[in-house]
């Protein structure tokens, strides 16, 4: 099945270390999202791509967080100088159409659980 | 986007219908109602969405009141595998800015019991 694939599934980082989280969306999907989910909470929006263009990064919590999607398919979320408060599950989702239309569902990956020690 | 209100938890007996309510009293005419669920340790899964009319698919039915201020997700024959957190989300249908993303609340934790 060609769903949204995220890697690694689990990542343990020492505080201050840089990490890179990868998302392979469903082939041909134009919209891509990153979400952060703290324990016991719902997912919170981080950033949104339409093909290779990052149209919204208003949810990124600090300038230590950076996302890219250079060729409009695979995306990477990078966190520099990780802190303990960055510990969470990072979810990627993709949609086949422009989700700004409002009537398009998003398909989520299983997430990457980041633990900063 | 309009805010939603859901009960924090519900129980349902296996094989019975699960009816999950959602209030969205500030919904506007161009906002869709979406339902997602999240099974433990997995990403959210799309269930169904609707604008004005009731909708049904292979997973569930969505009943939206005539004034659109509330809706109910119905799982007709709940199984143990339906135990999950269910999120009701309203989502505007317009272009521009951040309106493409989904805004999740805390959802309803549904426990299906044998």
Image (spheres, coloured by chain):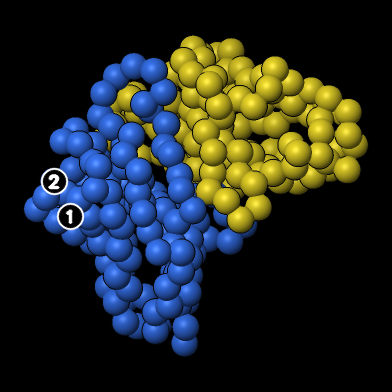
Q: Earlier in the sequence, mark 2 or mark 1?
A: 2
Question: Which quadrant of the figure has residue A6?
Answer: top right
In the figure, the yellow chain has which letter? A
> Would you say B77 lies left or right of B56 here?
right
Q: Mark 2 falls within which chain?
A: B
Labelled pair 2, 1 in contact (Cβ < 8 Å)? yes
Residue at the spot 61% in from the left edge and 56% down from the top edge: A40
| Residues packed near mark 1 inside 10 Å, few (<14), some (14 to 19) or many (20 plus) | many
Residue B64, numbered circle: 1
On screen, residue B24 above or below A47: below
Q: Mark 1 falls within which chain?
A: B
Secondary structure of the residue carrying numbered label 2? loop
Q: Which residue appears farthest toward the left when viewing the image?
A: B66
Residue at the spot 88% in from the left edge and 34% down from the top edge: A15
Q: Are marks 2 and 1 on the same chain?
A: yes
> Would you say A86 lies left or right of B50 here?
right
Along the line of sight, which residue is nearer the eye, B45 or B10?
B10
Q: Which residue is mark 2?
A: B52
Secondary structure of the residue carrying numbered label 1? strand
| Residues packed near mark 2 inside 10 Å, few (<14), some (14 to 19) or many (20 plus) | some
Along the line of sight, which residue is nearer the eye, A110 or B6?
B6
Along the line of sight, which residue is nearer the eye, A27 or B31?
B31
On screen, residue B49 above or below A35: below
> Would you say A94 lies left or right of B20 here?
right
| Residue A107 x %, y % | 45, 41
On screen, residue B31 above or below B89: above
In the figure, the blue chain has which letter? B
């Amino acid at each position: 099945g060609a769903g949204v694939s995220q890697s690694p599934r689990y990542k343990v980082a020492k505080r201050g270390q840089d990490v890179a989280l990868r998302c392979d969306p469903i082939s041909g999907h134009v919209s891509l999202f990153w979400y952060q989910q703290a324990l016991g909470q719902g997912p919170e929006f981080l950033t949104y791509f339409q093909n290779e263009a990052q149209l919204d990064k208003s949810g990124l919590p600090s300038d230590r967080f950076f996302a890219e999607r250079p060729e409009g398919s695979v995306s990477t979320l990078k966190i520099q100088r990780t802190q303990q408060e960055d510990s969470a599950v990072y979810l990627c989702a993709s949609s086949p159409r422009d989700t700004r239309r409002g009537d398009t569902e998003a398909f989520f990956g299983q997430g990457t659980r980041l633990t900063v020690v | 986007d309009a805010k939603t209100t859901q009960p924090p938890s519900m129980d349902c007996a296996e094989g019975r219908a699960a009816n999950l309510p959602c209030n969205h009293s500030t919904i506007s005419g161009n906002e869709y109602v979406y339902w997602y669920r999240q099974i433990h340790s997995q990403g959210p899964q799309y269930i169904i969405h609707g604008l004005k009319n009731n909708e049904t698919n292979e997973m569930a039915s969505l009943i939206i009141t005539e004034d659109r201020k509330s809706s109910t997700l119905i799982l007709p024959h709940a199984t143990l595998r339906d135990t999950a957190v269910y999120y009701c989300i309203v989502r505007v249908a317009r272009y521009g800015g951040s309106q493409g993303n989904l805004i999740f609340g805390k959802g309803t934790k549904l426990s299906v019991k044998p």
